[in-house]
Image (tube, rainbow, N blue to C red):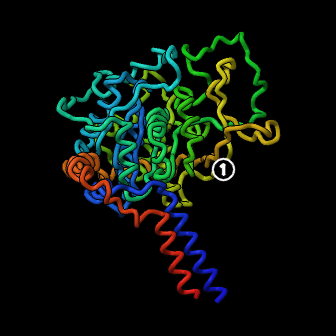
């Protein structure tokens, strides 16, 4: 009888705990919308948030070809490296060029950053990639001008996708955290629907690596002039957004730090040798696309790294618990980000190992980070996936795409059902009543 008591009590606590994850029960109308969407339950749902840089599109291309993932939406962060109109347009154009023109909804996002008015992104960080897809000096591709973005904005799409997904949704952020931070600020309840947050970038340096945290006013490296080196741009460009997301209560955050990404250089000799060794022949556009980043950015090959697609591949490795993946070593750390406008040379830097020197530091956040990589394994996996052209997340018909179904179902039930059925909320399915029912059940069998 004692063992039975323990077993039933454990079951009771597990169910109550799981019920509490979704703190607010859906109304009757919202339940109908969720059922109406008819979401694929066999793959891990994912939202990709991107600043539309070239390496972001490498990452998107890779993820679309992963069979275990269902990309529900792609959202774009404006003013990362392109002007507002081009950010989402470049994603739409790229999807069309790889054969995914109607498979995934693209939501245009918020203008960054979340900092107060007066902070401006340096023009040097913008414009260079606006037209890299169509530029004759870069990819020189034609554009389908009839491509349409999602009817939802990026922030709407994030909030509604999380709300109506039947299971927690992973999020892969390949740019700044602006869109996600705004979505969470507008609706805190969505935090419980985020599975794991994966982030490309960020710095996680021991506090001892900084010779001094005192302001150095002789260094005129102000926020609006240029990024703080060697700060990770995805963190630096909207450090407030990163801080807000990190401390929002998301249970698991995984990052591919900038320092680790720099151990994965874009070595074109290695690229072509790997293609030959694996007997892979990429389509001309794809081969040109993954080998032309230096040319498109007026940079040299030595400046290029496999930035965001390394974060995407690390995500898949973590999701599938693959011990043979390219990330050979991970580390669990606690980090905070320096946000003082006075310490110009440190603004946007993340620090770890603060327990000894700063035992009372507030705002520490748990991260799992990759600290060691194998470039050969990485490149083989990346090339294999993009060459497969399976595009698993693009196999939906337009009418069955997640954001289109979401809109259709909201139009059908949100207006027609909710006004007349507000009293029909299934309170008998709320965590409280489930707890009561289970308690009575346990009491009955223990009597």
- Where 274 falls versus 443 (above or below)? above
* Residue 255 horizontal/vertical position (percent): 56, 44
Residue 81 seen from this side: no
The residue depicted at 25 percent of the width and 57 percent of the height is 36
Q: Nearer the viewer, residue 111 or 80?
A: 111
The residue depicted at 55 percent of the width and 73 percent of the height is 12
- With 239 as the anchor, is 187 left or right in this view? left
- Where 337 falls versus 71 (above or below)? above
Name the quarter where the N terminus is drawn: bottom right
* Residue 122 horizontal/vertical position (percent): 49, 15
Q: Nearer the viewer, residue 147 or 426?
A: 426
* Residue 5 horizontal/vertical position (percent): 62, 83
**Badge 1: residue crowd in 10 Å (few <14, some 14–19, many ≥20):** few
Name the quarter where the C terminus is drawn: bottom right
Pointer 1 residue: 331
The residue depicted at 25 percent of the width and 45 percent of the height is 100
**Toward which corner of the image does residue 38 lie, by quadrant?**
bottom left
Q: Nearer the viewer, residue 123 or 264?
A: 123
**Toward which corner of the image does residue 146 lie, by quadrant?**
top left
The residue depicted at 42 percent of the width and 57 percent of the height is 25
Q: Nearer the viewer, residue 343 or 295?
A: 343
- Where 312 falls versus 301 (above or below)? below
Residue 6 seen from this side: yes
* Residue lying at the far front of the rendered structure: 423
- With 429 as the anchor, is 368 left or right in this view? right
* Residue 150 horizontal/vertical position (percent): 27, 38
- With 416 as the anchor, is 305 left or right in this view? right
């Amino acid at each position: 009888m004692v063992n039975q008591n323990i077993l039933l009590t454990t079951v009771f606590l597990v169910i109550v705990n799981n019920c509490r994850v979704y703190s607010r029960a859906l109304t009757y109308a919202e339940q109908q919308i969720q059922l109406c969407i008819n979401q694929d339950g066999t793959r891990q749902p994912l939202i990709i948030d991107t600043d539309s840089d070239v390496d972001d599109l490498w990452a998107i291309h890779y993820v679309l070809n992963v069979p275990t993932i269902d990309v529900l939406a792609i959202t774009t962060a404006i003013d990362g490296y392109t002007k507002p109109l081009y950010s989402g347009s470049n994603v739409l154009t790229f999807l069309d060029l790889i054969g995914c023109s109607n498979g995934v909804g693209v939501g245009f996002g918020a203008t960054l950053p979340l900092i107060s008015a007066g902070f401006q992104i340096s023009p040097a960080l913008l414009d260079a990639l606006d037209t890299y897809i169509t530029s004759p000096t870069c990819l020189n591709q034609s554009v389908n001008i009839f491509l349409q973005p999602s009817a939802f904005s990026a922030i709407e799409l994030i909030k509604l996708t999380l709300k109506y997904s039947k299971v927690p949704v992973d999020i892969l952020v390949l740019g700044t955290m602006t869109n996600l931070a705004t979505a969470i600020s507008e609706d805190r309840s969505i935090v419980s629907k985020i599975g794991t947050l994966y982030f490309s970038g960020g710095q996680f340096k021991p506090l001892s690596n900084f010779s001094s945290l005192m302001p150095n006013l002789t260094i005129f490296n102000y926020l609006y002039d240029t990024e703080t080196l060697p700060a990770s741009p995805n963190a630096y460009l909207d450090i407030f957004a990163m801080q807000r997301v990190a401390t929002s209560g998301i249970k698991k955050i995984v990052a591919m730090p900038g320092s680790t990404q720099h151990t994965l250089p874009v070595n074109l000799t290695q690229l072509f040798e790997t293609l030959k060794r694996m007997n892979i022949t990429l389509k001309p556009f794809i081969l040109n696309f993954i080998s032309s980043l230096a040319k498109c950015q007026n940079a040299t090959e030595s400046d290029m790294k496999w930035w965001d697609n390394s974060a995407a591949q690390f995500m898949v490795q973590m999701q599938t618990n693959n011990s043979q993946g390219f990330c050979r070593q991970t580390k669990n750390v606690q980090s905070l980000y320096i946000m003082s406008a006075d310490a110009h040379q440190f603004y946007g830097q993340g620090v770890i190992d603060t327990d000894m020197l700063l035992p009372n530091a507030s705002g520490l956040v748990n991260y799992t980070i990759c600290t060691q990589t194998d470039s050969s394994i990485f490149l083989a996996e990346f090339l294999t996936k993009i060459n497969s052209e399976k595009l698993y997340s693009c196999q939906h018909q337009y009418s069955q795409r997640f954001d289109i179904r979401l809109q259709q179902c909201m139009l059908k039930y949100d207006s027609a059902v909710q006004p007349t059925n507000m009293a029909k909320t299934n309170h008998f399915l709320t965590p409280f009543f489930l707890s009561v029912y289970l308690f009575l059940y346990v009491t009955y069998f223990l009597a």
